[in-house]
Amino acid sequence: MDGRSEFGPATRSRRRATISSTKGELLKGSNGVTSASASKPGHRRRDSHTKDSAEETRKSSRNDNMNCHKLQESLLSSASGFKNYRGILNWCVVMLVLSNARLFLENLLRYGILVDPIQVVSLFLKDPYSWPAACLVIVSNVFILVALYTERKLAMGTFSEKLGLLIYIINLTVILCFPMLTVLMVPSVTPVGGAFALGIYTILFLKLYSYKDVNRWCRERLQVKARGLSRSLSCPSPPSADGAVHVSYPGNLTFKNLYYFVSTPTLCYELNFPRSQSMRMGFLLRRLFEMLLLTQLLVGLTQQWMVPIIQSSMKPLQDMDYSRMIEHLLRLAVPNHLLWLIFFYWFFHSSMNFVAELLRFGDREFYRDWWNSETVTYFWQNWNIPVHKWCIRHFYKPLLRKGASKLVSQSAVFFASAFFHECR
């Protein structure tokens, strides 16, 4: 009895300790922490803070789902800053194609097929044994030889500067007047052939004027014992495999140098032009294909679309019916713009790149992004780069150096450009 009473309480206490330790191990296994650590005040605050953050997140997401409006501008408002209108541009192109297709179909139903490639030959020749426009182009070589002969005499000192200037004035004046008088007085010259010959003479006038100026600048530099113009003002050419060397004045006064300049698609003369490494046959054939295809397209659109509208416009012009005149003028607007765009690509891209590739002429900047023009000035400065460079180099800057104001110089360039565009 005494033994049982003596050892009984100790046994019960050991049993309580074993049960409590077992509960602690179970609690540790289930929660990953001991009961002692779980009962710390810091952990209780952290758990409560986590619960509060999760509750706030749920509340904010619930509020976001409920609020569907925010402060913003409409896309077509200038304050929105939205600038991607490509879809509207594509839609306008689709509408343009559909409207022009309707006009083309209406033209076919009313007039039938009017395209006749054989008829085009009559625009260039009235008599197959008479080629007045071609003869005019051949005669232009006389003016080229006169310019070369004058420059050689000036370089040797045989001609004075005043005599050389007088010869150039006569030569350039005849270049402008002779083809115009020939076209007016010779009845066998066709309109297209005459326009082609006049265009050739206009280009030749601008080229020989530039040839005169650059050689005069060379003589002036030689007189002050400065560097030759061939290295200071002419574009450097990449080294070529055939061992081509730069020429300097007066070594440039040769038939080869002058006729290369006359043939290249530029109006500004240099002693040494930038040259490409080689001729790319694939590029050349693609430009040739474009030239032939677009020529047929221009002729076809003119015969099928332009000619019937012009013929139907004769009666309103005779009757002075202004409303009908305006109506026919608006009908001509669409084909006129289309033909102008095709001609621009044909001349400034296909034809000029074809000639440049054939002659390995390196400067191919014949136009810039005039289609992005925001002002009329930007358009006129970027749609015809050869003429723009010539006007700046040989007309605008010389006027500024002589004391003319910018306004006077710009006006002079404008009227000179209008003269060469309208009188031809």
Image (tube, grey):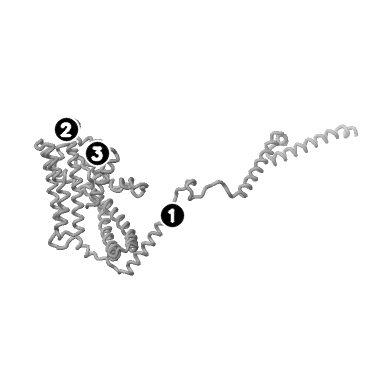
Q: Earlier in the sequence, mark 2 or mark 1?
A: 1
Q: Which residue is mark 1?
A: 88
Q: Which residue is mark 3?
A: 399
Q: Is residue 293 above or below residue 59?
A: below
Q: Earlier in the sequence, mark 3 or mark 1?
A: 1
What is the x, y in percent for residue 87?
A: 44, 54
Q: Which residue is mark 2?
A: 222
For residue 270, say whether it is visible: yes
What is the x, y in percent for residue 70?
A: 57, 47
Residue furthest top in the image: 225
- Give the total of numbered labels: 3
What is the x, y in percent for residue 332?
A: 32, 60
| Amino acid beneath label 1 | Ile
Residue drawn at 16 percent across, 40 percent down? 252
| Amino acid beneath label 2 | Leu
| Amino acid beneath label 3 | Leu
Q: CA distance from mark 3 to mark 2?
A: 23 Å
Residue drawn at 17 percent across, 41 percent down? 212
Q: CA distance from mark 2 to mark 1?
A: 60 Å
Helix, strand or loop for disc 2: helix
Helix, strand or loop for disc 3: helix
Q: As drawn, is 44 to the left or to the right of 164?
A: right
Residue drawn at 67 percent across, 40 percent down? 52
